Amino acid sequence: MSDILTTDLFGDAVTLPSGRRGRPAHKWSKSSADKVILGLAMGMTTDEIANGLGITSPTLRKYYFSELKRRDMQRDRFELWRVHQLAELANEGNVSALKELGKLMVNRDRAKAIAELGDGDDLPKAPRIGVKQQRVQAADDAATSSGWGELLPAKMTH
């Protein structure tokens, strides 16, 4: 019997049972490869992507190894594709796309400026003090700043 192909709700090719034993072998498809790339761009794990495609992780690694190998660049590729799509729409006169491009530029510039300034970890931190010491300091500050300092008795320590 020949394999009968049909599509499911999400448009994926599904092989109907042919009477043979076992699960049918997975077949590589462009749409599945695109889904793997999109999942990697969104930061999904290989287990999540495999689950979404309805295959096991080893099958994902076997058939889509070239996409998985370029995991670290998929996010940048997706961002570049997104900017390209917006630029094409803006060239056609779409004002919303032009505004969105402006927002993307501002966000990228802000992120770049923050990265150049650093996160401020190199600044010395104030020493941590306990709750009791904070209360003593607050009482001293209240006594000296309110004008009552000379009328109050001297500070008593334990």
Image: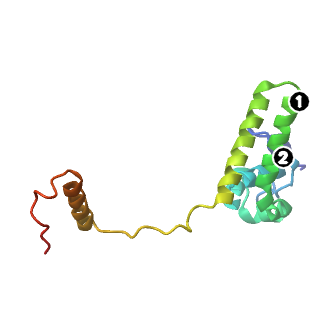
Q: Say which residue appears at 49% left-offset and 69% top-offset.
A: 124
| Residue 85 locus on image (x, y percent) | 84, 37
SS category of the residue bearing label 2:
helix
Mark 1 residue element: helix
Residue ID at (81%, 41%) = 83
Q: Farthest residue in the bottom direction?
A: 158
Does 80 sit above or below residue 103? below
Point out the image quarter for the C terminus. Answer: bottom left
Query: Residue 105, located in which quarter of the rendered image?
Result: top right
- Count of numbered circles in the view: 2
Is residue 109 visible to us here? yes
Q: Mark 2 packing: few (<14 Cα in 10 Å), some, or many (20+)?
A: few
Instruction: Return the disc, 1 or 2, that comes first in the chain's sequence.
Output: 2
Residue 62, given in percent of the width and then of the height, sits at 82, 65
Which color scheme does this rendered protein use?
rainbow
Pinpoint residue 108: horizontal percent, then vertical percent.
72, 47
Give left or right: position of 153 versus 81.
left
Q: Quadrant of residue 59 in the image? A: bottom right
Disc on res. 132: none
Instruction: Report the mark closest to the observer, 1 or 2.
Output: 1
Q: Nearer the viewer, residue 135 or 45?
A: 135
x and y percentages locating residue 90 in the rendered image: 84, 30
User: Residue sitting at 73 percent across and 57 percent down?
Assistant: 55
- Identity, as a three-letter code, of the amino acid under mark 2: Ser
Answer whether residue 15 is visible to the viewer in this image.
no
Q: Amino acid at mark 1?
A: Asn
- Name the residue nearer the viewer: 130 or 92: 130
The residue carrying mark 1 is 91
Is 52 on the left-hand or right-hand side of 28? Answer: left
* Residues at marks 1 and 2, CA–CA distance in whole angstroms: 29 Å
Q: Which residue is mark 2?
A: 31
